[in-house]
């Protein structure tokens, strides 16, 4: 209501000392408050020092949150990250580079799984179990001297991921040779 009234009159709003005001807010509420103040269609002035809200720099707004309340200063890094995200949009080139990196890792993991496919089939035939347990696979791969892509011994978890990847690859394409070309 105050914003609408000030808009009609062409006036600006006076905000009591933001430090005192935000001292009683939790970090989430303080962040929302700053976002709302930035978005208001009228001028906001700090009644404590007479400065317009729009003249506060990002660094000053961040320090306002850091010093405003103990809850805010404890969670200051969260607010700092949110302020950076709100002010600076995510770099598109960085997102594309991350996506290319994930695709490369996935291709390498597929290639490694394909290389171990015949070994897994041989283990499955020797054990005689159609649904081979990840623990048995890890044990056999370690006994055969195989290591993970990073050179570590196989664990139940890494064997489980390998079996899952092989099953997924088999479901995606009936012939593994075509996938590798």
Image (tube, rainbow, N blue to C red):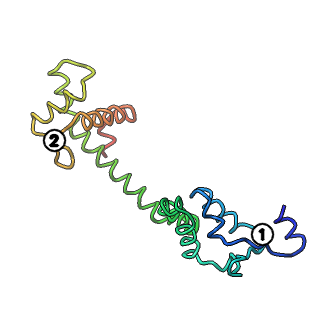
Residue at the image position 16 percent from the left and 20 percent from the top? 127
Q: Nearer the viewer, residue 109 or 25?
A: 25
Disc 2, SS: loop
Left or right: 80 with respect to 35? left
Q: Quadrant of the N terminus?
A: bottom right
Image quarter of residue 14: bottom right
Residue at coordinates 24% horizontally, 35% vertically from top-left?
159
Residue picked out by circle 2: 153
CA distance for labels 1 and 2: 61 Å
Residue at the disc numbered 1: 41
Q: Position of residue 121 (x, y in %)?
A: 21, 28
> What residue is at 20 percent from the left and 44 percent from the top?
148
Q: Is residue 48 left or right of residue 75?
A: right
Q: Is residue 157 left or right of residue 139?
A: right
Q: Earlier in the sequence, mark 1 or mark 2?
A: 1
Q: Position of residue 82 (x, y in %)?
A: 54, 62
Q: Regarding mark 1 in the picture, which secondary structure is present there?
A: loop
């Amino acid at each position: 209501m105050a914003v609408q009234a000030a808009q009609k009159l062409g006036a600006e709003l006076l905000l009591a000392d933001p430090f005192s005001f935000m001292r009683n807010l939790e970090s989430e509420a303080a962040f929302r408050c700053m976002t709302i103040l930035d978005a208001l269609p009228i001028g906001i002035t700090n009644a404590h020092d007479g400065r317009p809200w729009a003249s506060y720099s990002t660094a000053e707004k961040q320090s306002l949150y850091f010093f405003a309340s103990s809850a805010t200063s404890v969670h200051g890094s969260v607010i700092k990250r949110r302020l950076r995200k709100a002010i600076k949009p995510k770099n598109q080139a960085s997102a594309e580079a991350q996506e290319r990196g994930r695709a490369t890792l996935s291709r390498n993991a597929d290639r490694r799984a394909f290389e171990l496919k015949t070994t897994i089939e041989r283990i499955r035939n020797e054990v005689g179990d159609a649904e081979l347990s990840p623990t048995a696979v890890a044990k056999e791969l370690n006994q055969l001297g195989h290591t993970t892509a990073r050179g570590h011994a196989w664990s139940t978890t890494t064997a489980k991921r390998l079996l899952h990847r092989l099953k997924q690859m088999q479901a995606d394409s009936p012939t593994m040779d075509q996938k590798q070309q």
